[in-house]
Image: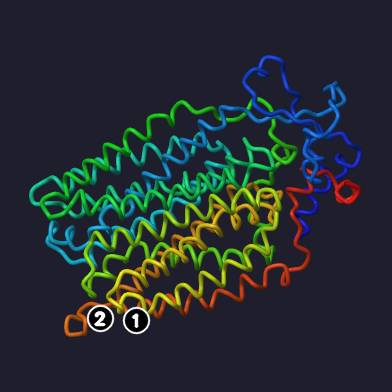
Amino acid sequence: MPPEAERLLAPHREMNEMADLNPRREVEEGLSRSDTRYTDEQRRADFSGVSSSQLPFMEVNEDQVVYRVYKRRWFGLFQLVLLNIVVSWDWLSFSAVANTAATHFSTTASTINWLSTAFLFAFVAAAPLTLYTLHTGGPRLAIITSSLFILVGNWLRYGGTRCSPPSFPLTMTGQILIGLAQPFVLSAPTRYSDLWFSPNGRVSATALASLANPFGGALGQLINPFLAPNPGSIPNMTLYVALISSVATIPSFFIPSRPPTPSSPSSTHPRPSIRQTLSILLTNTTFYLLLLSFATYVGLFNSISSLLTQIFSPYGFSDSESGIAGALLILVGLVSAAVSSPLIDRSKAYLPFIKIVVPVIALSYLAFIWAPPTRSLAAPYVILSVLGAASFSLLPVALEWLVEVTFPVGPEASSTIIWAGGQLSGGIFIVISDALKAGKSADPPFHMHKALIFQAVVAMAAVPAALALGWVGGDVRKARLEVDKGTRAVEEES
């Protein structure tokens, strides 16, 4: 662990050793609004594998620290889910109907690709402001900021598609504004779960909010081809998406900013400043390894999601069949993550899980090289389902493990940086893949076989970085869990 992090953690460890944790005590006024309360002793029992319900009844007195989670936490989590769905649906609105949109704007599919690419680059541009907002204002301010960008961006896009002739620059402006909205809600789940959820619920909460983002992409892939079967229906498709997105932003202005009392000891731990945060991360080898792996596979996922229609169409697949492929990629992944996340929440086996899943992802990209040329649906659908299951299961586990190994750095810092890396690499991969597209004289015309080879090579090249986690970079500890459990000595005693 970097020396700066050790220095920041030292006072809290000494406090734990003296059993003198000092988060804010609960107040009687809030008792009726909580659905879980647990003492320091019960918390340690939960981590040792003993259910708190098996312990003898313990009356809470002034010497015991009480941590609570509140029912209202689900309202804020629901809003994060909602916004991540619509912002990703907005992202792939035109990619799902790339050829139809190209005809509507009197341009090419490659130009339409820039709507997705610019969206990803906008994430990177907004990352510093996102980090500052989450660090100083918390999830609520980030959610409101995102909602405002989503509102304005969607109606600018609609104006661009509706005017005569259609204005691609105006549509692009709206798309960029929505791209600026994405980091505020995509980087927020780890911060929100750290603030509102107990240690045994964080992975599941992060999974629910983070995986809502690709679920929105699945809706776009699946529904938009039916909303826009011809070029003339592009404005109506954009209108429907704008209406849904606008309604989804309304609850943002009513969510609470923070719980009345802490959810865990680590949620009360003082966070380093942004300058200290960057100093800790820049000296953390594990952070670099995970950044490389995460950015690569998120980038590849963004690239393949954006280009699916253009990957399939040269081989005779329809936009609807390509949309179903994209939906399978995401929906099977969501089911897989729904199963794996609670298991990881209980076992905390972050690192073994990462090392098992990453090779599966890389091999899926390798196998997919030969899937579209089969001209049958079976091979692409099966391979994309496996790829989705592995990718989605990995996502929340990697995010939460990153928080553990970079603690006491705030969750918003590490997640914003690696998400920005993923979006940046995704934009670069889309540009490279589009450049590798075959010409009109190829057989079949405009196929993307070379682009699939490129993706597979990159996916395989990133595997060693993931496998090196825990071996390279010195001692890797789950520092946040240590604070929540107590000291190392307490962990061993339990």
Kindly identify the residue that appears in the image at 43 percent across and 38 percent down: 145
Query: Could you tell me the amino acid type at mark 1?
Result: Lys
Q: Mark 1 points at which residue?
A: 450
Q: Name the residue under label 2.
A: 438
Residue 253, x across and y down, in percent: 44, 28
Q: Earlier in the sequence, mark 2 or mark 1?
A: 2
Side of 69 relative to 320 (left or right): right
Q: Quadrant of the N terminus?
A: bottom right
Residue 371, x across and y down, in percent: 36, 76
**Crowdedness near tag 1: few (<14), some (14–19) or many (≥20) residues, C-alpha within 10 Å:** some
Q: Name the one closer to the observer, 268 or 240.
A: 240
Kindly identify the residue that appears in the image at 37 percent across and 80 percent down: 370
Query: Could you tell me the amino acid type at mark 2?
Result: Ala
Q: Determine whether the residue tagged by mark 1 lies in a helix, strand or loop.
A: helix
Q: Determine whether the residue tagged by mark 2 lies in a helix, strand or loop.
A: loop
Side of 466 relative to 316 (left or right): right
Kindly identify the residue that appears in the image at 41 percent across and 50 percent down: 215
Residue 313, x across and y down, in percent: 23, 70
Using the numbered discs, state the Cα–Cα distance from disc 2 to disc 1 in whole angstroms.
Answer: 8 Å
Q: Name the one closer to the observer, 288 or 75.
A: 75
Side of 390 relative to 37 (left or right): left
Residue 164, x across and y down, in percent: 8, 48
- The color scheme shown is rainbow
Is there CB contact under 8 Å for labels 2 and 1?
yes
**Crowdedness near tag 2: few (<14), some (14–19) or many (≥20) residues, C-alpha within 10 Å:** some
Q: Name the one closer to the observer, 51 or 451.
A: 51
Query: Is 7 situated above or below 253?
Result: below
